Amino acid sequence: MLNADLIRYVERRPDTFVTLTSGDRIVVKESMDDVIERAVEYQQRKHYMPTPRVALNCTS
């Protein structure tokens, strides 16, 4: 499990290297495109706020 908030950048070499904000580098089995897609998806879900539903009371 990799916390997407800690990713500084991702490099594609023969393997995929992820550099963290701490300066640590790790090699992952996923492709660079997959890592980026998952990180973006995580950030979007993290900041997603559903629109509030407004109940309409229609009384005559």
Image (cartoon, grey):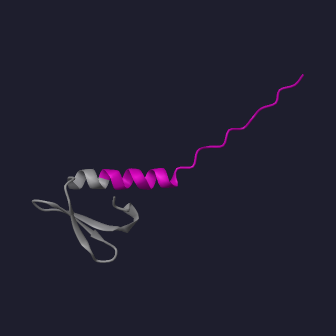
Q: Residue furthest bottom?
A: 23
Residue 26 lies, with reference to residue 34, above or below; the image says: below
Q: Residue 44 in the image: state x and y as whole percent.
A: 45, 52
Q: Residue 59 in the image: state x and y as whole percent.
A: 87, 25
Q: Residue 58 in the image: state x and y as whole percent.
A: 83, 26
Q: Residue furthest top?
A: 60
- Total residue callouts: 0
Left or right: 41, with 46 as reference point = left
Left or right: 2, with 56 as reference point = left
Please name the residue shown 47% across and 50% down the image.
Answer: 45
Please name the residue shown 51% across and 55% down the image.
Answer: 47
Q: Nearer the viewer, residue 28 or 52?
A: 28
Residue 32 lies, with reference to residue 52, above or below; the image says: below
Which residues are the magenta region? Answer: 37-60
User: Magenta segment: does it hold 23?
Assistant: no
Q: Nearer the viewer, residue 1 or 47?
A: 1
The answer to which quarter of the image holds residue 27 is bottom left
Q: Residue 31 in the image: state x and y as whole percent.
A: 20, 53
Query: Looking at the figure, which quarter contains the N terminus?
Result: bottom left
The answer to which quarter of the image holds residue 39 is bottom left
Left or right: 42, with 59 as reference point = left
Q: Residue furthest right?
A: 60
Q: Residue furthest left?
A: 14
Left or right: 8, with 58 as reference point = left
Query: Looking at the figure, which quarter contains the C terminus?
Result: top right
User: Magenta segment: does it hold 48?
Assistant: yes
Q: Nearer the viewer, residue 27 or 8?
A: 27
Please name the residue shown 77% across and 32% down the image.
Answer: 56
The answer to which quarter of the image holds residue 3 is bottom left
